[in-house]
Image: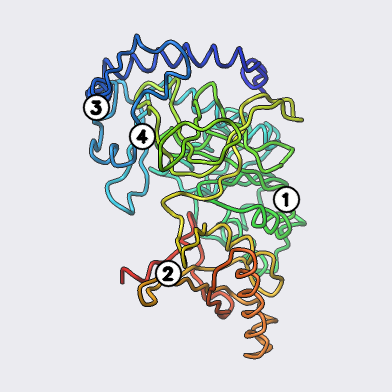
Amino acid sequence: MWDKTYETMSADEMQAFQLGKLKETVAWVYERIPFYKKKFDEVGFQPGNLKALEDLGKLPFTVKTDLRDNYPFGLCAVPMTEVVRVHASSGTTGKPITGPYTKDDLAQWCQCMARTMDSAGITKTDIFQNSYGLGLFTGGLGFHQGAETIGCTVIPASSGMTERQITLMRDFGVTALGCTPSYALTIAEKASDLGVDLRKLPLRVGCFGAEPWTVEMRKEIEERMGIKAREAYGLTELGGPGVAFDCDMQDGWLHVNEDHILPEIIDPVTEEVLPLGEKGELVFTALQRRAMPMIRYRTRDITQLKRETCACGRTLIKMKKVYGRSDDMLIISGVNVFPSQIESLLLEVAEVEPQYVLIIRKKGYLDALSVDVEAKPEVYEQGEDKLKQVEGAIEARIRGVIGIGVKVRCVPPKSIERSEGKAKRVFDARKL
């Protein structure tokens, strides 16, 4: 699935290709989607005004509320007779985000997913266990079709029934796994409880995504499962997983499939476009999608971009592993805190498990953060004095690195709810 035509294209060639596709897409949405025609007209922009990639910055942004306001198919550019599949987000915070696809959209998605999985070293000789949820969520069928495009054997296990997941791995000789990183940890823990050493099975690689995860969590998964843990980044609004992926370098940067999706970085406050290398909010524009192409979609993910020839040979623009989401950022005692920062520090502590929740409460006029983290069984059994020692050490570490006071509580093993999909790590007790 190595596509040298696009994955190793020079910057000048790629930008010329992008400009051609961008002109097509801008004209397409202007003619077919009343929402975009109105938005473009309001800023006095006609498709013919697009002469260079830099002109993209003159176009208005698309945000999540725009998709919800036009639910379910107000942003669809084709009649439903041309829509062959519809996916949707979970809709846990309001109306779900819908994602319609034409036949060509699905073919492009398959190609992007095949690139993602090929970069992880998955080949036609692999047996791939797909433990992402199969249904409206894009992850399950996204990985399923990527694996089928590669030609490997696919086991559509879906998520849940964790003991059966382990049985399938062992009995079917599974060599590659796909699921959320938090569910990978759930599988590893359950395997340990059952006396199954995953490191002795043929399993060698996992392709994980759908939620933020730190380098420290990657190392934890690799140690517990005896595999290489690879990252797949995507979002429903841009077609699902397959937007970006890591490579053998695993240097904290992901390759963006920029022949399909054009990335920008903006200042989340001023909304000004930032130069390569600057940290800011990631914005994406679909270049080849036809059912529902997004123009300048604000992801709320905080990252940065750079362009270089990677040691793996790819020239695709790179995005830094996401630091966090601007709308997930916590402000504690005047300090901006991302949950991923807390996770990184917790996973450095040998006495605790990688299972935790962050709880925000009101303390006077300020917000206060507390952390519940599971102690390892052998640590919990040592009693209160040992737990207080561990709690104090974590509190001091967080204060020293992040600069905030946090109350840490070591809770009993297996007392925090396990995830079969996206883990819920932050609980806002202010709203209760």
Q: Secondary structure at mark 3?
A: helix
Residue at image mark 2: 360
Q: Residues within 10 Å of mark 3 (few under 14, many from 20)?
A: some
Circle 1 SS class? loop
> What is the C-alpha distance between the residues marked 3 and 1?
46 Å
Horizontal side of 304 relative to 47 (left or right) equals right
Q: CA distance from mark 2 to mark 3?
A: 38 Å
Q: Earlier in the sequence, mark 3 or mark 1?
A: 3
Alpha-carbon span between mark 4 and mark 1: 33 Å
Q: Which residue in the structure is indicated by mark 3?
A: 35
Number of the front mark, 3 or 1: 3
271 or 32: nearer the eye? Answer: 271
Label 4 belongs to which residue? 99
For marks 2 and 3 on the same chain, the one whose residue lies earlier in the sequence: 3
Q: Are marks 2 and 3 in contact (CB under 8 Å)?
A: no
Camera-side residue: 99 or 66?
Answer: 66
Q: Residue 227: which numbered mark, if any?
A: 1
Amino acid marked by disc 1: Ile
Question: Which numbered disc flags the more N-terminal residue, 1 or 2?
Answer: 1
* Residues packed near mark 2 inside 10 Å, few (<14), some (14 to 19) or many (20 plus): some
Residue 314, picture quadrant: top right
| Residue 18 placement (x, y as % from top left) | 51, 16
